[in-house]
Image (cartoon, grey):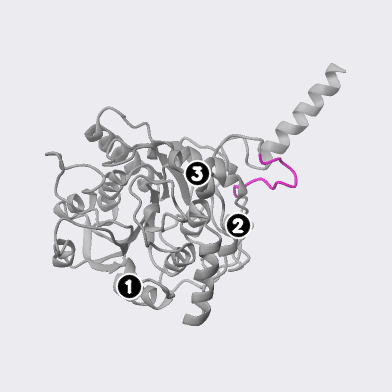
Amino acid sequence: MASRARERASDMLRLLTSCGTLGLGSSARARPATGLCLPGRSPRRPASDVPRNHPPSSEFVARSVGICSMMRLPVQTSPEGLDAAFVGVPLDIGTSNRPGARFGPRRIREESVMLRTVNPSTGALPFQCLTVADLGDVNVNLYNLQDSCRLIREAYQKIVASGCVPLTLGGDHTITYPILQALAKKHGPVGLLHVDAHLDTADKALGEKLYHGTPFRRCVEEGLLDCKRVVQIGIRGSSMTLDPYRYNRNQGFRVVLAEDCWMKSLVPLMAEVRQQVGGKPLYISFDIDALDPAYAPGTGTPEIAGLTPSQALEIIRGCQGLNVVGCDLVEVSPLYDLSGRMAKVLRSHQQARKSTNVEESKILARDRLKPFSQKESLFFEMGVSLGCPGWL
């Protein structure tokens, strides 16, 4: 009896390891990914036969089984051999309103078990194009924001030096500043697609020049951004001045207000963005509060009248072919989403929205009747697509 039990346990261990639930993953060295689709690259690169990490199928491994990694991918301590990697940064001591984003990475990972390996809307097979793993969390200092930024910067310098593209789970928006410090050290000033309700270019608050409202001003001051290739989408909310966008526009940023996005497809906007950012290195920073709080209540600084999930996917899919060198999803604060609404994968919004204004209005009306958010779906679209043409 004991021998039979040991055999069953051994069989289960082999199954979990082969499905990527346990272990450190493949050691095969793959081509370093440098973006979604570099200029001149075929729009649909054939899937490779090289063994790669794959999320386990629920047909063979129950979703409640395994280590709580992103999509139950293997957990590694080193980025070597990876094209892209999920990295958690559980920091929220830079918040100005409601804290809780330190729990964002863990909750995103918990809910990512619902993500599967293929996007039927686009026909891509990302896990046959890329070697991807979860690198765990940066060991931040929750008692010292400056020291946390140093720790983040040093961790990301090692990641990008290996040729691995970091896909970040935040964490409040302060974390983007040290990440961009690391990326700029390798790539020079980068372009930025910043999707957010807020500009995040304040100078200081309570005498402090570093918190989640200041990261991009600090980046400008340090020359980390190619300011003519910075686009901010979804900006809205009240202000202390009549022209809160002056600083940003003076730097050369393009600022797209949320009200200019209401009741329309963002496909034409993203065609313009693609022209603006060109083929040079681009970083995508997506604050979940860019979405209307009807879809994304679990965040620290919600603002009404935001983007819809379908518009968010249009933004991300509009980045296909750009030289994306990293991305983040920040300000996910699950404490304020007691219903779990924000933690669901919004499968109904996986289809590309290439429609007329009339059809888009119908989609938006349906969205309001189905108040779900899609942080995992959005992150999957934004992240695993790196280097895999056609995924978006």
Above or below, comparing residue 117 to residue 259 in the picture: above
Percent across and percent down for residue 107 are: 50, 40
Q: Is residue 27 visible?
A: no
Cα distance between the residues tagged 1 and 3: 30 Å
- Mark 1 or mark 2, which is nearer the start of the sequence? 2
Question: Which mark identifies residue 108?
Answer: 3
Quarter of the view holding residue 94: top left
**Mark 1 Cα-neighbour bin, 10 Å: few <14, some 14–19, many ≥20:** few
Q: Amino acid at mark 1?
A: Asp
- Mark 3 or mark 1, which is nearer the start of the sequence? 3
Q: Which residues are magenta?
A: 52-63
Cα distance between the residues tagged 2 and 1: 38 Å
Q: Amino acid at mark 3?
A: Ile
For the N terminus, the quadrant is top right
Residue drawn at (53%, 79%) of the image: 359
Q: Amino acid at mark 2?
A: Gln
**Mark 2 Cα-neighbour bin, 10 Å: few <14, some 14–19, many ≥20:** many
Report the residue marked by disc 2: 128
Query: Is label 3 or label 2 in front?
Result: 3
**Mark 3 Cα-neighbour bin, 10 Å: few <14, some 14–19, many ≥20:** many
Question: Which mark identifies residue 260?
Answer: 1
- Asked which secondary structure carries label 1, the reply is helix
